[in-house]
Image (cartoon, coloured by chain):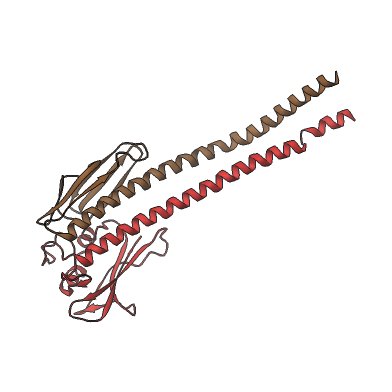
Amino acid sequence: MMEKRRRGQIFSADFLVGVIVVLFVMTSLQVYHSRIMEDIRQEEKLVFQESLASRTDTLILFRGEPKNWDNETVKTLGFSTGVPNELNETKLIEYFQMEDEKSESLLGFYERDFYLSIENKTGDVVEIDGIELKRGNKNWQDAENIYAVERDISLYGTSKGSIMRLVVW
Amino acid sequence: MLHSERSGQVSIEFMAYFGILLSIFVAFSPVIFNQAVEIRKRSAAIKAARIGASIEKEINTAVRFGDGYSRNFTLPDKISKSDYSLQINSSEHGNFLSLKWNEGVETRQLIASEIQGEPIKGKNLIKNSDGIIYFE
């Protein structure tokens, strides 16, 4: 009887409680880790999204440097006519005809994938003098993080509202 | 005699429990340690990204407001208790802001074409003079 009790004691209720406590602590640590990592991921997205908003602010509120830039003279990109959110069609045409490397560098996305377009309210890409106002590619399907910004704009001389869409991944 | 036998049993049971639970803890501890390191590194990286983004915003704002703009702003002295350095490098593809700390580098491309000087830890003055951005 005595021997029987001794053998069974290692798997007693005390032991089970101990194992449960340890497993509970381990599980809590895992949950805590997952939550912190999710918070960090959200924070990373927020920082990048704010950065995109700041860049697009510059594109739609700033005339560029020099003010009347063209493909040859442009130093800093800006499409505004001087009126907030109103874009200069000539500058847009110049930019959307630029060589890829130069256009990526000016936008601040050299060696990054992006898609920039000017669209009307129905989602069709705007075309001026036969030039489609879009740049980059739309291959973001497999991207882990996709950041997108849409800004309400108008094109100089037209009363119709348009959208500037920028997607980065 | 009986009392003495019980004490011995408690001790052996305690050792057995302690040993098994310690084994479980030791088995998990590398995972827990790696996760703690990962959190520390990612937290530092996100703080660096915040600082980089704030400098980028200051520059973009100075660009937008144009000639005559000036503003004071302050950058933290440390990133998660680590020292860090700031640098603006020019290349054929534009200006790049680099923020280095002991465990990583945060780099972001700037859209301003002409920048003189570099931001520093602590107090900064940013100015736009004739389209050129100055840090003082």
Against A39, is A19 above or below? above
Q: The brown chain is which one?
A: B
Left or right: B23 in relation to A153: right
**Tint applied to chain A in the drawing:** red
| Residue at the image point whose x is 20% and y is 45% from the top | B124
Against B104, is B110 above or below? below
Left or right: A7 in relation to B21: right
Position in image of residue A169 (x %, y %):
36, 60
Q: Quadrant of residue A87?
A: bottom left
Residue occupying the far bottom of the picture: A159
Residue occupying the far front of the picture: B72
Q: In which quarter of the image is residue B128?
A: bottom left
Quadrant assignment for the N terminus of chain A: top right
Position in image of residue B34 (x %, y %):
49, 39
**Quick check: can you spot residue A58?**
yes
Position in image of residue B38 (x %, y %):
45, 42
| Residue at the image point whose x is 66% and y is 34% from the top | B21
**Quick check: can you spot residue B119?**
no
Residue occupying the far right of the picture: A1
| Residue at the image point whose x is 68% and y is 39% from the top | A19
Residue occupying the far left of the picture: B130
| Residue at the image point whose x is 18% and y is 56% from the top | B62
Against A158, is B132 above or below? above
Position in image of residue A136 (x %, y %):
29, 66
Left or right: A121 in relation to A68: right
